[in-house]
Amino acid sequence: MADNDKAEIIQVLNLYGFALDAHQWDLFDLVFTDDVTAEFGPAGSAWKGLENFKRSFGEFHQSLDNHQHTMMGHLVHVDGDTAYTFSYGTWVLIRDDAEGGSNWTGTGWYDDELVRTEHGWRIRHRLCKLVSWTGNPLVPVPNAEHHPDMDTNVLRQHVDAGKVRYLAAIQGKQ
């Protein structure tokens, strides 16, 4: 069962990028719980609740001409009906009318807690941190609750501070 759980969880993690880039906000229902907490460092904001999160991400991404989100390097730890994952991401945002260039690319990581629901695995808590960026910082403009934060994060500092749920889970500290 664990391998099947891991495959289903990786599918959920990857579906997030597709749903986001295709502007298919209803697919977020297959990715997140209704009571999701989503903390996005690059957006400079956090959201409670799926409907609020979908609305805000929809508004922000509508301001862009194109974008691509890639999730990779998935690590999955299943503990009964809870799972902890760690993955890396790359985000390309394009806004053609941005003064100074149309592209902004960021890299970072996701530290997620998922739960098994009657409809399958869903992310209950997502933490996203920016590691690096390049391009025009004017592409991801503020929009509603989004206040783009270009501060970069060092994973080992979060690990040293005990703030990485996935690591705590595999070390039996969760």
Image: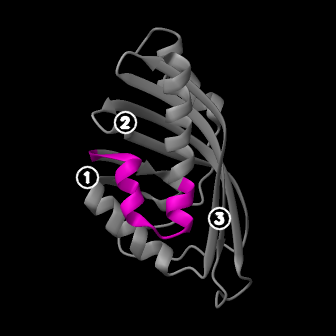
Kindly identify which residue carries mark 2.
120
Q: Is residue 7 magenta?
A: no
Q: Nearer the viewer, residue 166 or 151?
A: 166
Discs 1, 2 touching: Cβ within 8 Å: no
Q: How is the image coloured?
A: one colour
Question: Image check: 134 left or right of 122?
Answer: right
| Alpha carbon distance from label 3 to label 2 | 25 Å
**Type of amino acid under label 3:** Gln
Secondary structure beneath label 1: loop
Type of amino acid at the residue the image marks with label 1 = Gly
Provide residue 57's location: percent of width, then percent of height: 42, 66
Which residue is under mark 3?
A: 68
In the picture, measured across the screen, residue 7 lies left or right of residue 83, that is right
Q: Which residue is mark 1?
A: 49
Quadrant position of the C terminus in the picture: top left
Q: Secondary structure at mark 3?
A: strand
Residue 80 lies, in percent from the top left, at: 37, 15
Q: Give the class, few, some or many, for how many residues have Cα within 10 Å of label 2's Cα (few <14, many ≥20).
A: some
Rendered location of residue 21, percent (x, y):
56, 66
**Category of crowding for the residue at label 3, using alpha-carbon neighbours closer than 10 angstroms: few (below 14), some (14–19), many (at least 20):** some
Q: Are marks 3 and 2 in contact (CB under 8 Å)?
A: no
Side of 58 where 105 appears, left or right: right
Span of residues in magenta: 17-35
Q: 86 or 1: nearer the eye?
A: 1
